[in-house]
Every structure is written in structure tokens, then in C-alpha cells.
Image (spheres, rainbow, N blue to C red):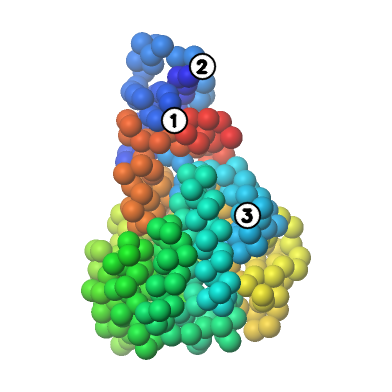
Amino acid sequence: MTTVIRAVRLVDGGAATDDAWIAFADGRVRDRGTGDGWRAVAADRVIDGAGGVLTPGFIDIHGHGGGGASFDDGAEAIATARALHRAHGTTRAVVSLVTASLDDLAARVAVVAGLAAADATILGSHLEGPFLDVGHKGAHTPGLLRPPDAAGVARLIDAGRGTVRQVTLAPELPGGLAAVSQFAAAGVAVAVGHTNATEDEAFAAFDAGATILTHAFNAMPGIHHREPGPVVAALRDERVTLEIIADGVHVHPDVVALAFTQAPGRIALITDAMAAAGAADGHYTLGGLAVTVTDGTARLDVGGAIAGSTLTQDAALRLAVRAGVRLATAVGALTHVPARAVGVADRFGSLAVGRAADAVLLDERLTVRSVWVDGIPV
């Protein structure tokens, strides 16, 4: 079946094209163009986009749940949370897992591996812990944090059967740089985060193979004029993608805009969403820790640290644009940039001919109207 979506503003590849059309067939982008060129396509279905904004499907490389469900709680919970985020435009996602014992993490990574084998919209797992700095633990159980060791790293990699996409770790921990190299050698995208690293220690991690900064500015030293810290290291290193939680709580909108200016083409807008995304305020649990969500902001009951977000990626897009980020640039931060960061840009994150037919149609307020996965409306 061939589907044509016409009369849209196509935002892809860093550019916006008015009066555009695109054709999907067999789960792929078959053709695209402008004006009335779509009439030459033998389409089974033609959809009038009515001037809406059409983008590639969003890709979230860091999120923990939504719709009242946490990714840590198994296959059914993952399905519930993915449905919530898919409705907001996130067509592909890495399933992030919070700190737990190695036994529990290995079991959870194995569950995600099984799901990824059956569902290509799940890109694999992201281990956010347990190799984190206790002083920047955020919403992670301190008693379960530990320095990395080769055997523990190998166990988690093996449990994932090639589906561990990303790991966040503090490279200044004993064994940290060796772990960076070990994960990177296994094809895992290594992120510096929940860390007390200095600028030099962050640079050392990047030289060892780390390529991402986990939720930049959060759970790490801030920028000081005499101690630049890991954020400045990431901004200066062209190899590094910086995750940003653009919810107006984790990072001020002006700082979101500043990050885009200082690291062009290297900002990935993530959700870091916990179970309360798309659900009501109230009491939740994240990684065994009690969390209360008030007015959409999640905080630990003990200590008051921010405990993930209730963000969806369409809302992140709207905030970035309101902050002054160019629409095409902000869309890239939801699509091509995160796809590249976890090694799937050859298939996803673009509506170029031959890529997966994942797309999001938004109205003039950038609210989601329709979503397609592999050319099928969802």
C-alpha cells in the first residue's frame, strides 16, 4: 500500500520546505517532492496535510516511563509507557533503566533485548547506573551505586545480547575510564553523567570513547569561571552530543537556547520522563525511591531532588521553539541528532528516500495531529 501525505511544511535535514509531499510504501519513504508532483504517484491513499508541519518521527534516547508505568517494571509496563510517548510523536526509543543490583539490571536488560527483537521501535536499553557518583546521584538509590569493574560491565553487555545502546557513568570513579573503553569497544554509546568530573576528567572520558553528556547541566558540576567542568568540556568537543531536558524545570529556556548556539548540531532533546508523564500528579516510585509529582514536577520525597520529568518530546519541541531555537534545528534535536548519537541514523531520524516511514504531523501550534510508524498510522 502506498500512502501520500500532501500539502505540508516538511521539516527535515535542517530545512523547511513548504507545499511538500511525501510517499510511503512498504514501510519506507518511497518518494518526496513539492507542489503537484504527488499526482504522478500511484497512491492507494492520499492525506491532505492542510499546511501542517511534517517531521521525521521523534527519537528519545533517554526516558524511564510514562502513562503511569515505569520501564523498570517489565514488558507490560514498557508497552504502556511507549504507547503514551508514541502518541506524542516518539516513534523510536531507547528504554532507560535506573540503578539496581547487577542481578536485577541484567534481568531487565534481557527483557528489553527480547522486546527489541520483536519490536523495532524499541532501540535497546540505556543503563543509567549503577556506575554513578553518589554525590550527584539524583533519583538513584545510593546504596546500589558502585564503581565499575570489568566483570560487571561484561555481565551487563552480555545480558543485552547486542541491545545495550547507551550507558551513563561517572568516569572519575575507580575503573571509570577502563569501563568507558570496554563499553565503547562493545558498541555501546557511553555517556558522562551523574558525575563530579572536572573538565580534564571529562576530556579524558571523551578520549577514551564517551560520546554523550547525560542531561547536560543536571547531576554534574555547573559552569564556573575557574572550574569549567564537564559541560564546557562537552561544548568544546565536537565528538560529543549533549542531552537536554527542555521542560523549563531542569534547564532554563535561555540556557536551552544557549546550548543550541554553543553546540550546533549536537543537542539531543530527551524526556528523562518517569511514570507520571501523561498521567496525574500524585505519588510514584522511581528505582525504589518515593516520588511526589506536583504541578507536573517530580521530586524525591526524601531530599527533594528532581526525579526525572513528566515531559513528552512534542512539548520539548514547543519549549525550544519558544526559547528562540529555529524550528528545523529543534526538530533535528529530536530526530537526526539522537539517532546519530546511538548509531541508528542510517535507518531513522530522517525522511530521506529509503529511510523508515516514521513521521509526525503537527498543527501550527506544534501539537501532534497524526503519527506514522513504518508508514502505518498509530
> In this picture, is 347 found above or below 46?
below
Q: Badge 1, how many Cα within 10 Å: few under 14, some, many 20+? A: some
Residue visible at 25% across and 74% down in the picture: 208
| Res. 363 visible in picture | no
- Is residue 124 in view from this perspective? yes
Q: Give the structural element (helix, strand or loop) at label 2.
A: strand
Q: Position of residue 375 (x, y in %)?
A: 48, 30
Q: Which residue is mark 3?
A: 75
Separation (CA) of disc 3 from disc 2: 34 Å
The numbered mark, 1 or 2, whose residue comes first in the sequence reads 1
Amino acid at dot 1: Gly
Q: Which badge, 3 or 1, is on the more N-terminal residue?
A: 1
Give the camera-side residue of 206 and 21: 206
Amino acid beneath label 3: Ala
| Residue 117 or residue 4, whichever sits in front | 117
Q: Residue at x 74, y 62 (%)?
A: 281
Give the number of the disc on residue 45. Answer: 2
Q: Residue at x 54, y 70 (%)?
A: 105
- Of the two numbered discs 3 and 2 on the same chain, state the one appearing first in sequence: 2
Q: Quadrant of the C terminus?
A: top right
| In front of the other: 277 or 72 | 72
Residue named by callout 1: 27
Label 1 sits on a secondary structure element that is loop
Report the side of 121 relative to 165 (left or right).
right
- Rendered image quadrant of residue 280: bottom right
